[in-house]
Amino acid sequence: MVSSREYVDGAIFCSTGSRTRFIPAFEKAFELLKGSVSKNSGKSRKRVILFLTDGNPTDSTTDLFKIIRDRNLELNNSVIILTYGFDSAYQEILIDIANQNTTKYGVPANTPVGDIAVM
């Protein structure tokens, strides 16, 4: 079994060369949060992702916001995302990530099951 510290150490660097990949970082963060949910705990705990970057995402922003939307839905939309950019990080996308503004990137907000239309 991997300790939390080893898991986090493996999740910290999700860039390859000059590419900055946000998706693997968010996938690992949500996986860690999902794995830490206790089924026996009656208490509601705050779940927070602190996302730090010094660059702009090179992965698809549509895919990024789908990951954020879908993974947060798996945790009952209980995850708060705090973002911090430095150096050349593009601030607008970090604000949109923190606000989980998925519709701006062509990803519809979560739809209640009763409102899903059959195509």
Image: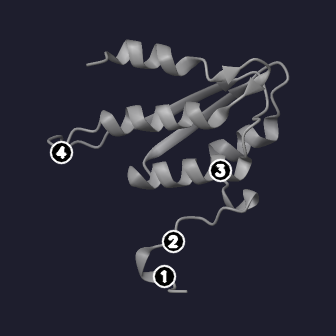
- The CA distance from mark 1 to mark 3 is 23 Å
Q: Quadrant of residue 51?
A: top right
Which mark is first along the chain, 2 or 4? Answer: 4
What amino acid is labelled 2 in the image? Answer: Thr
Q: CA distance from mark 2 to mark 1?
A: 6 Å
In-image side of 108 versus 85 (left or right) = left
- Give the residue number, with chain letter if any, for mark 4: 42
Distance from Cα at disc 4 to Cα at disc 2:
27 Å
Q: CB atoms at circles 4 and 1 under 8 Å apart?
A: no
Q: Earlier in the sequence, mark 3 or mark 2?
A: 3
- Mark found first going from the N terminus, 3 or 4: 4
Residue in view at x 57 percent, y 33 percent: 24
Front of the two marks 3 and 4? 3
Q: Nearer the viewer, residue 42 or 72?
A: 72
* Disc marking residue 23: none
The tag on residue 115 is: 1
**Disc 3 residue type (three-letter):** Asp
The residue under the point 65% across, 34% down is: 22
Q: Amino acid at mark 1?
A: Asp
Query: Who is closer to the viewer here, 75 or 58?
Result: 58
Q: Is residue 15 above or below residue 59?
A: above
